[in-house]
Amino acid sequence: MVAIPGDPAKGIAPFWIGKTELTWEAFDAYVYGLDLDSTEGNDGADAVSRPTKPYLPPDRGFGHEGYAAISMSYKNAAAFCEWLSLVSKKKYRLPTEAEWEHACRAGTTTRYAFGDDVSALAEYAWFTENAGGKSHPVAQKKPNPWGLFDVHGNVKEWCQGADGKPVTRGGGWADKASELESSSRAPQVPAWNRSDPQVPKSKWWLSDGPFVGFRVLCESQP
């Protein structure tokens, strides 16, 4: 986790946010209940809502250890934060759009956290031109000025929108350069879950969203 200074002018209090997008190692403990056998004293952890077990490998064969957790619905990401809050006794949640962009920009006002030169994007991000049609292990590219990796590209990151609705920020491995700018946003569209055979469609997994993940925020020092 990285400490992020607040911005009183924008009503943003200081917070801590994941240095990387959440990886499978952390998510597996939640989805498969690994904490129930190995952790004591976490009241309520055995009753927290957990996602249905995926009917297909959710990592799509891209890679697991060290890779960002993908195919995530907003519900799945938010429920993980609720679980993590229970087991850690700290307040974890998804960032708001304002908090996410504040952390992404790291004090900059340019198109990207590293400046306006799009030719440098490949040094900081996995996107359609260099990703090879898949996600990649986190923290393989350069970080932003505050030490956050993959704020541009790799996977889209869930946030709570300014209007209270879910939205993704940062762009992902399937996006073009203009969709990775610090101000870029992408609400969920039906195509992200089009091929899900379940009726009703899963609230937990995005059958056609292998480019969607998330990054956690902690309100106090973790």
Image (cartoon, rainbow, N blue to C red):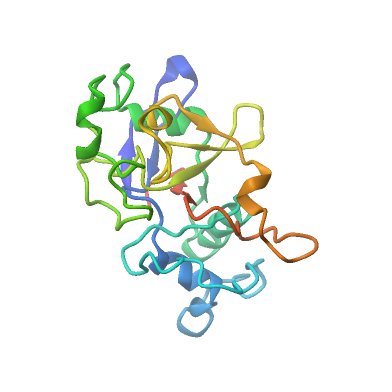
Vertical arrangement, residue 10 with respect to residue 204, above or below: above
As drawn, 133 above or below 54: above
Q: Is residue 40 visible?
A: no
Q: Is residue 192 left or right of residue 213?
A: right
When asked about the image quadrant of residue 164, the answer is top right
What residue occupies the far bottom of the structure in this picture? 37
What residue is at 39 percent from the left and 57 percent from the top?
68
Measured as percent of width and height from the top left, residue 93 is found at 53, 47
Residue 123 left/right relative to 57: left
The residue depicted at 50 percent of the width and 21 percent of the height is 11
Q: Is residue 200 visible?
A: yes
Residue shown at 52% from the left, 75% from the top: 41
Q: Is residue 152 left or right of residue 58?
A: left
Instruction: Quadrant for residue 113, please give it.
Output: top left
Please tell me whether residue 118 is drawn above or below residue 54 in the rendered image: above
Residue 67 placement (x, y as % from top left) = 35, 61
Please state if 144 lies on the left or on the right of 34 as rendered.
left
